[in-house]
Image: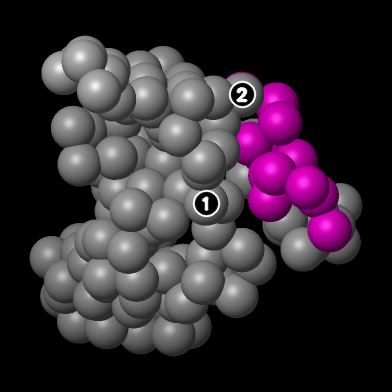
């Protein structure tokens, strides 16, 4: 044997473990709880208390911005994951598993709305797609991997 040094396979050459439907649901539930807590805090600030009935346009806008910021900033960070995704051990990346841009993450957020509007079929696609991509992932070219 000649002492050759073998290069480690690149990220794109390594076997990728795509995150399945149920692990992604678990992450989303955790993220939903976190955003619900943020919503309650915003309700106290804007409305002076928490109410399931009373709403305010400012509160609605603030909650929307909180959701967009939470998902987009964290998924495009070097961590590549929201807090929920980190807890369950998954991350969002491009085809090679690399960090996505903030613009791609914002696009992914809005594409999730489309996934939801069509009777959640865009999310259910994760269950039968070979690369476990939902419609929102296909639209912006993202993948969710086991970390």
**Badge 2 density bin: few <14, some 14–19, many ≥20, Cα 10 Å:** some
Q: Quadrant of residue 142?
A: top right
Q: Does 109 appear above or below 31?
A: above
Sequence-wise, the earlier of marks 2 and 1 is 1
Q: Would residue 11 be found to the left or right of residue 6 on screen? A: right
* Residue 73 inside the magenta-drawn segment: no
The colour scheme applied to this rendered structure is: one colour
Whole-number angstrom distance, CA of label 2 to CA of label 1 = 19 Å
The N terminus lies in quadrant: top left
The percent coordinates of residue 146 (x first, y second) are: 42, 56
- Mark 2: secondary structure: helix
Q: Quadrant of residue 85?
A: bottom left
Q: Does 69 appear above or below 36?
A: above
Instruction: For residue 81, say whether it is visible.
Output: yes
* Residue 133 inside the magenta-drawn segment: yes
**Badge 1 density bin: few <14, some 14–19, many ≥20, Cα 10 Å:** few
Q: Would residue 102 be found to the left or right of residue 5 on screen? A: right
Q: Quadrant of residue 42?
A: bottom left
Are the two marked residues, 2 and 1, in contact with CB atoms closer than 8 angstroms? no
Magenta-drawn segment: 128-140
- Mark 1: secondary structure: loop
Q: Nearer the viewer, residue 71 or 94?
A: 94
Q: Residue at x 47, y 48 (%)?
A: 145
The percent coordinates of residue 28 (x first, y second) are: 46, 67
Identify the residue position indicated by label 2 in the image: 140
Identify the residue position indicated by label 1 in the image: 17
């Amino acid at each position: 044997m000649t002492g050759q040094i073998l290069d480690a396979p690149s990220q794109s050459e390594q076997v990728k473990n795509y995150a399945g439907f149920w692990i992604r649901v678990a992450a989303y539930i955790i993220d939903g709880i976190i955003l619900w807590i943020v919503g309650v805090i915003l309700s106290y600030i804007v409305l002076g208390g928490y109410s399931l009935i009373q709403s305010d346009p400012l509160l609605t806008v603030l909650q929307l911005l909180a959701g967009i910021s939470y998902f987009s900033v964290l998924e495009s960070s070097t961590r590549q994951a929201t807090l929920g995704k980190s807890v369950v051990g998954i991350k969002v990346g491009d085809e090679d598993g690399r960090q996505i841009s903030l613009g791609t993450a914002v696009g992914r957020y809005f594409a999730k709305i489309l996934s939801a509007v069509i009777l959640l079929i865009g999310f259910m696609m994760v269950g039968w797609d070979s690369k476990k991509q939902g419609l929102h992932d296909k639209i912006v070219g993202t993948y969710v991997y086991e970390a």
